[in-house]
Structure formats: structure tokens, C-alpha cells
């Protein structure tokens, strides 16, 4: 595989091992010598402190101090020379004490050269110098003890550099062996890890082509084995589910075909009912108006029956007109004319026309003072939508009898809402109120002459313009709303 996990695993781990070893070599080469020198400086200061204390105590010439001095020199690979004020050597571990004593006297009398100074105090000075005879670098510490004795402490740097070189060579050999061993181990481990993963990949590939016969056969207890067993269970579940889905899909196709047939029959029924009722309703309305003009002798009875006939005929005619409108919207026979208009003016004009009904029912209609808000839509269709919302609110307002109308203008959409105080719509009815002839409270709907078609017309109009609409329950009432596209720029 081009992007093999095994290859990535091997490359990453070997790179980590090699990078770690190279980093160690780099640090050794750059920092180890300085670290050794710092340690050597501390050793020289420790030796100076011991010599100074022995000098102050008068033990510098004792055998006990000789033994302690030998230990210090052997442990830290240093050499010491102590001379009295007459330039006579008192203690030394130097191979050439006379030469070193001359260097000490030269340093005391003429001062040190320009070599690298490591530390300097009133009592001593420490620096790296080069011996002119042997061309060997030393760390030299020289000065005067508290008792006035002169001292010189030296340690060669060649040993430090040789130790650093040996350390780097050893680390290089060990690192090379570690890289080889790591590579072999990583290859072996990656084979063990990637083999079951490749098996799972093959199983998933076969499952993609709906072949559920492949099963994971590993019997270990690792996370991959757990994944394999889960894939086996997934394979069995998918096989059973696909079988059920095929069966359900077959039944669904039958149901869809049946529903389409029922919808066609229902639409045809509504069209026929609308057509058949239109003429007799017109006749009933005409005869009722004739009776009202004075056919019966009993004027009061004649007036009562005529009013009932006219009222019922008017309701039936309204229902037929609404059915025809709904039918046209559902079949797409009614043309939607999208135009720019002032939604504020449309709402205010409708409220003004319904003022008598509002006062009769003693309803408080609230609406803020909105300026001109232009939107895109079918003006007559939106007027029908608002009329249905407002009529619905008037018929169901209760309690404080407040109808609150709000217009919220946004950059893209303008939202219009009609809220009325009263009882919320039952939750089980929320999803059905947009269906034709659905009535939440049949008795109350019959009382005000509702047909259950109004909200269906709202749905059809808003969907014909591809706009949103809806309803929201509150604790103290119900809000119906719809949106329209806002006109952004007016010339």
C-alpha cells in the first residue's frame, strides 16, 4: 500500500530512535566538555578550600594532610604545589615542581597573561593556560592562602577532551546497534499489528459490496480483536437490517402508490364538490333574497327564515370559493405574482376594515408604529394569509382579549406574527392544523362558522412563494407567523 501504516510505523519509530541518538551526540559534542570543565572548576575550588583550612589549622605539613591531599589529587586528576613566603616548596604533587614554582612566582610578581579567565577573587585566580614547553592546555588556579603561603593547582584539559571523544565514540557504536535492533523489532511488531488491521480492511471492503460472509477470525484479547468482534456483529446486524429495509422499501413503494391514488381521488372529489355546489348555492341565495322581499304573510317568520337561508348560503358559497382557491393553489393553476409592496400599509388597511368587528367583540388590537417596510410577495395572497391569521385570532381570543401584531424587519427576511391571548393549541394537534378540514375544537369552530380550510390555504400560499410559516404556543396564548423577502434597496 502506498500509505501503509506499517511503513509509517517503522519510519516514525526509527526516526525517533535515530533522532534521539543524534541529539545526544550533538549535546555531548557541544556541552559535555563545558560540563566537565565546570566540574573540574568545582574540584579545584574544593581542593583550595581544603588546603586553606589545613594551612590555617597548621596541619599542612602533617602526614594526615598528605594522605587527604593524595585522595583529592587522585579523585579529580589534579596536581598541587604549596610554597612558603621564602619561595620554598612545602607540599607538591607536581612532576616538575621547580618549573611550576617559577610559573607561580611569575604570575604573582608580573601577573597573569591574557588567557581565558574562569574565576577571579582577592585570594586566587583561575584560568585556562597553554604550557609553552608541552603545548598542553591546563586549568591553573594560583594565589595566596590566608596564612600567606603561595599555591598553584593544575589540571590538564587533554584528559577531559579524550573522555568526551571516548564518550561520543561509544554512544555512536551503541546508537548504531540500537537503530539496527530497533528497526528489526519495529518491523516485527508492525507485522503483528498491521496484519489484523489489513484483515479488518478486507472485511470492510467486502461489506461495502454487501458481502457479509467474511468474518474476523482472531482470538486474542487486544483492542483490535475487540474491534474485529464488533465488526462481525455489525456485519450480522447490517445483513438483517438491509433485509428488513428491502422488505420495508417494497411496502413503502406500495403505500406511496396507494397514497398518490388517494390524493388524486381527494383532489378530484374537492374539484367536483366545488363545481356541483356552486350553482345550487347561488340559487338558494337568490330564492332567499326573493323570500326576504315578502313572499310569506307572516312578516316576522318570513324575515327569520330568510335571514337563516341567506346566512347559510353565504357560508356555503364562501366554503366553495375557498375550496376552489385551495384547489387552484395545490394544482399550481393560480399564478403567483411577486411584487414589491408595503406590508405595514396592507396590515393597517385590513385592521381598519375590521374595526367594527373588533369593537363588537371588545378585543384590544396592539401594533407598534412601524414605518414603511417593503417586501417581495403576492400582495393579494399575503392579504389572504393575514386575513386567515387575524380571523383565527379573533375567533379564539380569550382572557385579556388581546391581539398583538408584530413586524420584525431583517436584512434578508421580514417576519410578521399575529398573537392572541387564550388557550394554547394541544400538542397533539400542532402537526395537523395545516391539514384541510382539521378542527381542534369542532364545537367552537361550528359556533363561529369555520370550515377548517383557512390554514390549509395559508400553507398553500406560503409554499407557492417558497416562504416560511408556522405556529408557536405560549402559556397565555398562540402566535401564528410567516416570513417574506425584504426589499433591500429602494430607488
Image (tube, rainbow, N blue to C red):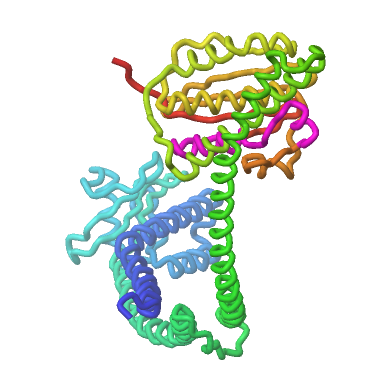
User: Residue 28, how many percent across, how many down?
Assistant: 34, 65
Q: Measured along the vertical axis of the image, is residue 193 above or below residue 84? A: below
In this rendered view, identify the residue nearer to me: 282 or 114: 282
In this view of the protein, can residue 171 be seen by the observer? no
Residue 152, x across and y down, in percent: 35, 55
> Which residue is depicted at the point 46% across and 86% down?
195
Secondary structure mostly taken by the magenta-highlighted segment of the chain? helix
Residue 455 within the segment the image draws in magenta: yes
- For image coordinates 42% across by 59% down, the residue present is 39
Q: Please indicate whether residue 150 sits to the left or right of residue 223 in the image.
A: left
Give the x, y percent position of residue 424: 75, 32
Q: Nearer the viewer, residue 361 or 365?
A: 361
Q: Is residue 281 visible?
A: yes
Which contiguous range is marked in magenta? 441-469
Q: Residue at x 48, y 40 (%)?
A: 328
Residue 443, quarter of picture: top right
Residue 171 in the image: x percent, y percent? 36, 76
Residue 294's place in the image compared with 208, above or below, is above
* Total tally of numbered discs in the picture: 0
Compared with residue 239, is residue 285 higher up or lower down, i.e. above or below? Answer: above
Which quadrant of the rendered structure holds the C terminus? top left
Q: Looking at this view, is 77 or 281 the one in front? A: 281
Query: What residue is shown at x 19% (from left), y 66% (from top)?
Result: 134
Residue 268 is left or right of residue 114, and the answer is right
Taking the image as shown, residue 50 lies to the left or right of residue 339, namely: right
Amino acid at each position: 500500500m502506498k500509505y501503509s501504516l506499517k511503513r509509517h510505523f517503522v519510519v516514525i519509530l526509527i526516526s525517533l530512535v535515530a533522532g534521539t541518538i543524534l541529539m545526544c551526540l550533538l549535546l555531548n559534542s557541544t556541552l559535555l566538555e563545558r560540563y566537565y570543565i565546570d566540574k573540574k572548576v568545582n574540584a579545584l575550588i574544593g581542593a583550595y578550600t581544603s588546603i586553606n583550612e589545613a594551612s590555617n589549622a597548621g596541619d599542612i605539613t602533617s602526614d594526615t594532610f598528605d594522605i587527604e591531599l593524595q585522595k583529592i589529587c587522585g579523585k579529580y586528576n589534579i596536581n598541587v604545589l604549596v610554597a612558603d613566603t621564602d619561595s620554598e616548596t612545602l607540599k607538591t604533587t607536581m612532576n616538575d615542581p621547580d618549573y611550576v614554582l617559577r610559573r607561580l612566582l611569575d604570575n604573582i610578581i608580573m601577573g597573569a597573561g591574557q588567557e581565558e579567565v574562569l574565576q577571579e577573587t582577592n585570594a586566587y585566580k583561575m584560568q585556562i593556560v597553554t604550557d609553552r614547553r608541552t603545548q598542553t592546555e591546563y586549568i591553573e588556579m594560583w594565589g595566596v592562602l590566608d596564612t600567606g603561603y603561595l599555591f598553584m593547582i593544575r589540571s590538564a584539559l587533554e584528559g577531559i577532551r579524550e573522555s568526551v571523544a571516548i564518550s561520543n565514540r561509544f554512544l555512536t557504536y551503541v546508537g548504531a546497534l540500537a537503530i539496527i535492533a530497533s528497526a528489526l523489532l519495529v518491523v516485527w511488531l508492525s507485522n503483528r499489528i498491521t496484519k489484523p488491521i489489513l484483515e479488518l480492511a478486507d472485511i470492510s471492503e467486502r461489506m461495502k459490496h454487501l458481502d457479509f460472509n467474511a468474518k474476523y477470525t482472531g482470538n486474542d484479547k487486544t483492542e483490535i480483536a475487540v474491534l474485529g468482534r464488533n465488526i462481525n456483529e455489525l456485519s450480522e446486524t447490517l445483513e438483517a437490517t438491509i433485509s428488513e429495509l428491502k422488505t420495508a422499501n417494497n411496502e413503502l413503494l406500495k403505500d406511496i402508490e396507494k397514497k398518490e391514488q388517494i390524493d388524486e381521488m381527494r383532489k378530484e372529489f374537492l374539484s367536483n364538490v366545488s363545481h356541483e355546489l356552486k350553482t345550487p348555492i347561488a340559487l338558494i341565495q337568490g330564492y332567499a333574497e326573493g323570500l326576504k322581499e315578502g313572499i310569506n304573510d307572516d312578516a316576522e317568520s318570513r324575515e327569520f327564515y330568510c335571514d337563516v337561508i341567506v346566512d347559510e348560503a353565504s357560508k356555503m358559497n364562501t366554503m366553495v370559493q375557498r375550496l376552489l382557491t385551495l384547489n387552484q393553489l395545490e394544482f399550481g393553476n393560480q399564478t403567483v405574482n411577486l411584487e414589491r409592496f408595503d406590508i405595514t400599509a396592507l396590515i393597517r388597511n385590513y385592521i381598519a376594515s375590521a374595526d367594527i368587528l373588533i369593537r363588537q367583540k371588545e378585543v384590544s388590537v396592539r401594533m407598534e408604529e412601524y414605518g414603511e417596510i417593503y417586501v417581495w410577495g403576492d400582495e393579494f395572497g399575503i392579504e389572504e394569509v393575514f386575513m386567515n391569521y387575524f380571523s383565527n385570532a379573533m375567533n379564539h381570543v380569550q382572557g385579556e382579549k388581546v391581539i398583538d401584531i408584530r413586524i420584525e424587519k431583517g436584512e434578508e427576511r421580514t417576519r410578521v406574527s399575529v398573537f392572541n391571548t387564550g388557550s394554547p393549541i394541544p400538542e397533539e394537534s400542532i402537526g395537523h392544523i395545516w391539514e384541510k378540514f382539521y378542527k381542534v375544537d369542532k364545537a367552537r369552530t361550528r359556533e363561529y362558522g369555520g370550515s377548517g380550510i383557512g390554514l390549509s390555504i395559508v400553507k398553500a400560499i406560503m409554499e407557492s412563494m417558497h416562504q416560511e410559516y408556522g405556529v408557536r404556543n405560549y402559556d397565555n396564548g398562540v402566535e401564528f407567523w410567516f416570513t417574506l423577502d425584504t426589499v433591500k434597496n429602494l430607488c
